[in-house]
Image: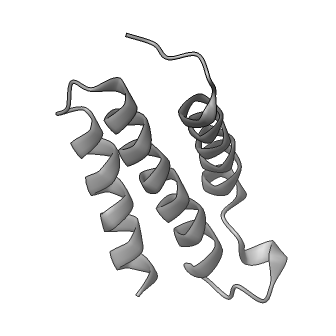
Amino acid sequence: MAEYIGYLASVFIVGGFLLKNLRTIRFINMFGCICFVIYGIFLNDYRDLNQWLLPVIIPNAILALVQVYYLTSKKEES
């Protein structure tokens, strides 16, 4: 099941590059990052923290937070 979440994350990330609207790109990318975080946790034994893929989880969690910040900020970019 985790592999499918990884594939879904890849589709979101690649799909975001096909769009032109910045807000939509950020939204799609955020979902991709969240999927990669889930993938990094559940690929192996999620109950064992040593099995988590931290090189996948950490940057995607940070990027998801960046996307949330820009999606919720009051200043709109054109």
Question: Can you say whether 26 is above or below 27 in the image?
Answer: above
Quadrant assignment, res 43: bottom right
At 21% across and 24% down in the image, what residue appears?
20
Between 67 and 2, the residue placed more toward the observer is 67
Q: Quadrant of the C terminus?
A: top left
Q: How many marks?
A: 0
Between 24 and 75, the residue placed more toward the observer is 75
Question: Can you say whether 60 is above or below 40 in the image?
Answer: above
Extreme residue in the top direction: 78
Residue 69 as seen in the image, left or right of residue 67:
right
Query: Looking at the picture, how far across and down is residue 61, in whole percent?
Result: 66, 50
At 42% across and 44% down in the image, what residue appears?
27
Residue 47 as seen in the image, left or right of residue 38:
right
Quadrant assignment, res 62: top right
Question: Can you say whether 35 is above or below 78 in the image?
Answer: below
Between 75 and 12, the residue placed more toward the observer is 75
At 54% across and 35% down in the image, what residue appears?
71
Quadrant assignment, res 51: bottom right
Query: Looking at the picture, how far across and down is residue 57, in whole percent?
Result: 65, 56
At 70% across and 85% down in the image, what residue appears?
46
